[in-house]
Structure formats: structure tokens, C-alpha cells
Image (cartoon, rainbow, N blue to C red):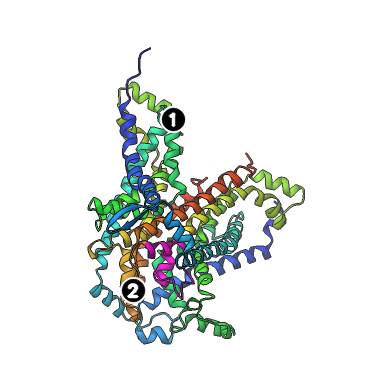
Amino acid sequence: MNKARRNPVNIAAAHGILILYTVIALFPVFVILINSFKTRRAIFREPLALPDADSFSTVGYETVFNQGDFFGYFQNSMIVTVASLFFILLFGAMAAFALSEYRFKGNTLMGLYLALGIMIPIRIGTVAILELMVDTGLVNTLWALILVYTAQGLPLAVFILSEFMRQVSDDLKNAGRIDGLSEYTIFFRLVLPLVRPAMATVAVFNMIPIWNDLWFPLILAPAEATKTLTLGSQVFIGQFVTDWNAVLSALGMAILPVMVLYVIFSRQLIRGITSGAVK
Amino acid sequence: MRKPPIRWHILVFLAPAVLVYTAIMIIPLFNTLRLALFDEVDRTRVFVGLDNFRTLFGDPLWSDAFWNALGNNFWFFLIHMLVQNPIGILLAAILSHPRLRFAALYRTAIFVPTILSFVIVGFAWKLILSPIWGIAPGMMDAVGLDAFFLPWLGLEGTALTTLALISVWQFVGIPMMLIYAALLSIPEEILEAGECDGITGAAAFWKIKLPLILPSIGIISILTFVGNFNAFDLIYAAQGALAGPNYSTDILGTFMYRTFFGFQLQLGDPHMGSAIASAMFAIILIGVCIYLFGIQTRMRRYQF
């Protein structure tokens, strides 16, 4: 191997740049989290100090729990995200199977039609989506959000999953057919288990934007009972602007579940992105 | 000739996805474009042709706001292209170095801001840059730059650039990951062949790797373009629907939201909102077409 690739100065510089950027990336999160556990005076006197016995306080979190229904918001976000992912994966995989497995008239055209939505953001149609939801009485229900996120996630899901399903061996499926399995059994029993890694990739890709979206909860489901965590913390912080303890704790409350999910799924997410799913 | 039987299972497999996608995405999209041609007179919807667009581009009351939002949006996009993508490429180039220790740790840490919601990011930075709390001024004081501190988010001249940089901070992980993946897919033999010809280090990056990752940079650019031209959340979270100070951070997303949903004294107008949405659709479509036909087809792809 060449010497230039192992030059210690270069290695040190590389680590220097990466550490610097890591600090930039994590610093704001760190500052918010440590200050959410401090008294008001400590927040202002020494914003960069860790909470100690003297300055430790959970008064902010108490306000958050007493004033805002964060548990309800969290539950709404959970329901919306899990249900949307379920429908994206189920419907997406079914359509991807149809497109990759069978030859029929209009196959390519159908693929192109479904792919349109990858580049065109669904937000453009918001005015008509709101009218549709008002007409069908779905406004201020979680179903409105689930339907919108399902429609939003399907194009990319179909695209990625059909790429993967083309790699499933034909022999296996034909063996199943000879054994008299129906097309549905072949799909659910043989093909779905084999594309599980791709399904996981699609799920983590969709999870973050759905969980973090502010636009559709704000427009389609702003009622107190259907607020998601993102919208709930936005409204809560707006009301408590001057109560620094409460604002910092609300931010902390919003950060923690995402961080937990990230710690669980980060390997899957990073592998999904780097495996070249987006080509 | 015998007609082949209808294969119902294909229909069953396709129907749910096609129905949901068509009903919630495609039909509303075209309905929005259609609504832009209507207006409400005496509580009934009347067809007015291109009148809404005439108002949007011709009436100074509307056109000033529209061009302001469009100009701001282009500036927002430009900052992303000039700051986010070079930083992303630099980080990816360093990370893809073989035998770099802790690479996975850096990768995971740098990606953290990308998973946070705009609400968290907007408020966290608002607090940190706030002159009341004093984290930013305090830190600049520590390095002797305190004279340069300004309440950046509160000044008309700097608020938009500051927000764009915050958005860059949040999303730098995405170009980093995509470029990183592209760099890893370059075969070792090519780099070794370059080394035999004496091309190493920075020269290897500029002469061998960069040309090979150009298609990925193209994809990142179009993703950034589409993302920026329907951005809304960060501005709304940090500056509110009025995109203050004095509309200096107004972009198309916030302008459309204010117009169609109404805000404070302004009444919501779904038809003008649709007109703005149609303009956004046209801009995104032009961008995507330029990419698909102008850039992607001309880019040389290398097969390994």
C-alpha cells in the first residue's frame, strides 16, 4: 500500500475535522438536554454547565406533564406512524409484487404512474386534500394523516421493493406453483419473508419524515385530541415562550423518543441508505 | 384464438396501492391545479380562467409577496448547494478513507440532527442564538469575537441566511451518506491503477473519485431542489407563519400556507392558495425536467 494513504498528519487532520463537525452536530442537542434539567437561575447563569446537586431541577418537566397532554400526543404520533408504515409496506409490497412478477398490458405504464410521486411532493395538492377530508368527514381524525402518509410513502416503497423482488429466484416461486400454492400464498409465505431487509429499509426511510411532519397535522388534524407530538410540542412551546424551563423540557421530551428510536434503528437506517437503495 | 382468462390476483395485488395513491395524491394534485382556475363569488364557485394567476403576477399586492418568496426560496436553495453539499462531500471523502477508526461512530453522530423534527431544530437554534440566553454571544466572547455577535434571526438582512444555515446543519447527513455510499462503490483496482501512475491523496480525489460520484451529486442536487421548494416547517417553527422579520424569511411554502389557510387578519383563500401551489408545481416540474433531460442524460456513467 502507498505511504500517502497512511500519513499520520493526514489521519490526524481527518480526525480533527470529523471531531469538529461531530461537536457542531451534537452541541445544540446537548445544550438543550442538560439545560432542561436545571433551575431557571442556573439556565441563565451557566448555560454550558452540567446540572449538579445545586442546580438540578425537574420543574420544567412538571409543567410539561401538567399543562400539555404529551402522553396523548406521543400516542397519536405512534398510531399514525405505525399504521402508515403498515399500509405502506403491505400495499407497497403487493403492488411491487404485481409489477415485478407478472407480465401484463400496461405494466411499464403502471410502474411509471406510481413512480411519479417520488419526485412530486404531495404537499402541492394540500388544498384539494383538505377539501377531500372535509367532504368525507375525516378532518381532525388520525385516519386523515394515515391516508396521506400512506399515499406519500407508496411511490418510493413500490420502486425500492420491486427492485428487490426481481432478485427473488423464479425457481422457488415455480416450485411453489407446482406444489399447488395460490399466488397469494406464494406472495405472503415465500416472497415477503425474503424481502424483509428491503422492507426494513423502506420502513426506516418513511419513519422519520412521518414522525417529524408538521404540515399535515397542522392542516388536517389540529384538534387537541389528534395532535401529534411534533405539532403538540410546537403549540406548547408557542404558548410557553417565556417559561424557559417548560420550553427546554418540551424540547427534551420531543428529542428523547426520536433518539431512542434512532439508537435502535441507526444501523438499519445507515445500511439502508448506503446499500444504494436510492440510485 | 382463445382469450386468456383475467388474472384477478394481479388486480387484487395492485388495487390497494393504486387506489390510495390515486385518491389521495394524484386526484388532489390535479384538483388543486383545477381549483386555481376558480374563484368564489357570493359563496358559489365560479370559473375565472387565469384570473388568479393575473392577480398573483400582476397585482402588486400579491406579486411583490410572490416574487419576494420566490427570490428567498432561490437564496435558500443556493445556500444549501454552496454549503451543504461541499461539506457533505468533504465529510464523506474523509469517512470513506480505508482503515479510519471510529468511522461508524462519526457517521452515527453526524446524522443525529437529520432525525430531529423541524420544531426541535428551529426552537433549539432560536434559543441558542438568542441574545437573552447568551450562549452564542458568550461563546463568541470566549474566542474574542463578541463584537461580531448580532441577533441574526431577528435582523431582516441575516435571518434568511441564518435559517438556511440551520437547515444545512440539519440535513448535511443526507449528502454525506449518499456520497459515502457512492465512494465505497468505487473499485479498489481503479484507485490502485491511479496510484501506480502517481495519483494519490487529494489528486486522486479530484481526478478519479469526483468524476465517478458526479451522478450521486446530481441526485442530491435535485433532492435538495425539491425539498427546498416545498420547505415550510423550519421557517414556521422558528419565525411563525408571518415569516418575519417583515417577511424577509418568507418562502413559497409559508406564503402558500398563509394564503390558503389564512392567518390572523388575513382570510384563507383556497383559490389563490391553489394558484400558488400550481406555481410551485411548475417550478418543481421545471427543475425535475432540467435534471432528467438536461443533466442526467448527459452525465457519463461508468460501469465497473
Q: Is residue A225 left or right of residue A199?
A: left
Q: Is residue B182 left or right of residue A270?
A: right
Residue type indicated by callout 2: Ile
The residue most toward the right is: B197
Do marks 1 and 2 share a subunit?
yes
**Mark closer to the observer (1, 2):** 2
Q: Nearer the viewer, residue A47 or B129?
A: B129
With respect to residue A276, does A13 lie above or below? below
With respect to residue A60, does B197 lie above or below? above
Magenta extent: B231-259
Quarter of the rendering occupied by the C terminus of chain B: top right
Q: Position of residue A265 (x, y in %)?
A: 40, 55
Identify the secondary structure beneath mark 1: loop
First along the sequence among labels 1 and 2: 1
Quadrant of res A243: bottom left
Q: Position of residue A128 (x, y in %)?
A: 34, 52
Q: Which residue is mark 1?
A: A169
In the image, which disc is placed on residue B230? none
Q: Is residue A187 visible?
A: yes
Q: Is residue A23 visible?
A: no
Crowding near the residue tagged with mark 2, few <14, some 14–19, many ≥20 C-alpha atoms within 10 Å: many
In the image, which disc is placed on residue A237? 2
Residue at 67% across, 58% down: A6
Q: Nearer the viewer, residue B21 or A207?
A: B21
Q: Nearer the viewer, residue B118 or B136?
A: B118
Residue at 70% across, 47% down: B192
With respect to residue A271, does A232 lie above or below? below
Q: Is residue B171 magenta?
A: no
Q: Is residue B272 left or right of residue A12?
A: left
Identify the secondary structure beneath mark 2: helix
